[in-house]
Image: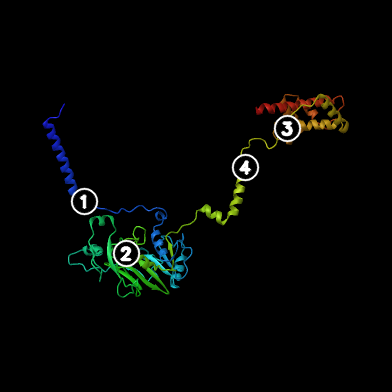
Amino acid sequence: MTPTRRDWLMRALLAAAALGTAAWVASCTEWVDVDVPMPLRGEAAKNDLYITQQLVRRLGATVAAPSSLSELPPQHATLLLTSWYWDLFPERAKRLKAWVENGGHLVLYASNLDHEQLKRWLPIQELQPPRKPAKEGEDDEDDTDATPDDEDADTAAPPDGPASSPKSAIERLMGLPCQDAVEPESVPPAYADGWRHYKVCSYTSSSGWRMQSSVPPLWAVEGPKGPLLLRAPVGRGQVTVIKPWGLLENDRVLKGDNGLLAVAALQARAGAAIWFVTEEARPPLLRWLWHEAWVVVLLGTAALALALWRGARRFGPLAATATTGRRSMAEQIAGTAQFLRRDGPEALLGAQIRALEAAARGHVRQYDKLDRSQRAQAIAQATGLDAAALGLALDKSLARKRVDLPATLQLLETARRLLVQRDRNTRR
């Protein structure tokens, strides 16, 4: 079926509508190249200060990252302390203070200034801003709340500094908030070329608390709401406090002028020693026991293995079971004759009585405490034999004729065998 003129017209209208829609979308769309940060890999994914450490290494400084503050750095070194549990042992605060006073350089974040053991001797403190006088008719309870002027202070120009440049919408969404900062004229500049203006890209607290030094600072970087970095002397050493949290971490140290501030805060230079203490780790218990007392561990393991081996169920007897066999009649007669010739009939009778009594002890309760008649009565009840005959047979002191000995031995052996047979039937 060939298409008609009407069909061609509908196709043309649809094509025109599609082209118009595409042109409208293209005119209303703006294509912008956006740099998307790649996820961290390798050591940088595990170490938040990896980029900072590599930066100071490139400048010629030596870097150490111990897993705890059990040992302090050498004198005149720099210690960046961000561990939450560095004060696990009370004496560490005293040792840290003595190390700084003897020439060490301690670098902290401002969040550590309220530490009970540090604020006793640190010359830098965070002070609450003074309250503004309340107007008539207003409640004085919320005097410490941030005002609109304080909220916009992040983008305001610092004293004696250039105005902040406007940011695009993409930069505000993808980047960190940045603010301009400046080194005051009262402190020497960190760099020899006299550069004093920086762009600090990080998050800062909006609580209005302001860092202040009780002694003249050695170096400072001022922001719109007060010092962002501040260094003060302590004895022969120094303490540097950084207010923007995470300024030295991987995702921020390369933003703006954060790298320049990181190098200045750590005083990184060729030959400097910089320690990064970010955790208070301990080896696992089993590894520590093996390292400290491996001899005791080996002996204890051997004793435990021996105890388990002795108490375990065995697959067989300790020794091979001896095969049982019956002696021939000739051997029995020969052995009995030899015994009679050597020891006499009285010894044979005594041996037979002892064999019966050994079998009777397993069937008669407290057999050894019974007299001869009671023993005979108990054996008779167990075997069904005559109690009077058994009593005479058990009497070793009775004088017997040789002709009566076979009958007595037969009675005793019969009683013994009946007791043994009864024992076997009970076990079954």
Q: CA distance from mark 1 to mark 2?
A: 30 Å
Q: CA distance from mark 3 to mark 2?
A: 93 Å
Q: Which label number is shown at residue 309?
A: 4
First in sequence: mark 3 or mark 4? 4
Q: CA distance from mark 1 to mark 3?
A: 100 Å
Q: Which residue is mark 1?
A: 30
The image quadrant where one finds the N terminus is: top left
Expressed as whole percent of the image width and height from the top left, the position of residue 115 reads 39, 65
Residue type at the position of mark 2: Asp
Q: CA distance from mark 3 to mark 4?
A: 25 Å
Q: Which residue is rendered at x = 15% and y = 28% of the image?
A: 2
Q: Which residue is mark 2?
A: 257
First in sequence: mark 4 or mark 1? 1
Foreground label between 1 and 2: 1
**Disc 1 to disc 2: CB gap under 8 Å:** no
Element type where label 3 sits in the image: loop
Residue type at the position of mark 3: Ala
Q: Is residue 106 visible?
A: yes
Residue type at the position of mark 1: Glu
Q: Is residue 331 left or right of residue 159?
A: right
Q: How many marks?
A: 4
Foreground label between 4 and 2: 2
Q: Is residue 296 left or right of residue 222?
A: right
Q: CA distance from mark 4 to mark 1?
A: 79 Å
Q: Which residue is mark 3?
A: 322
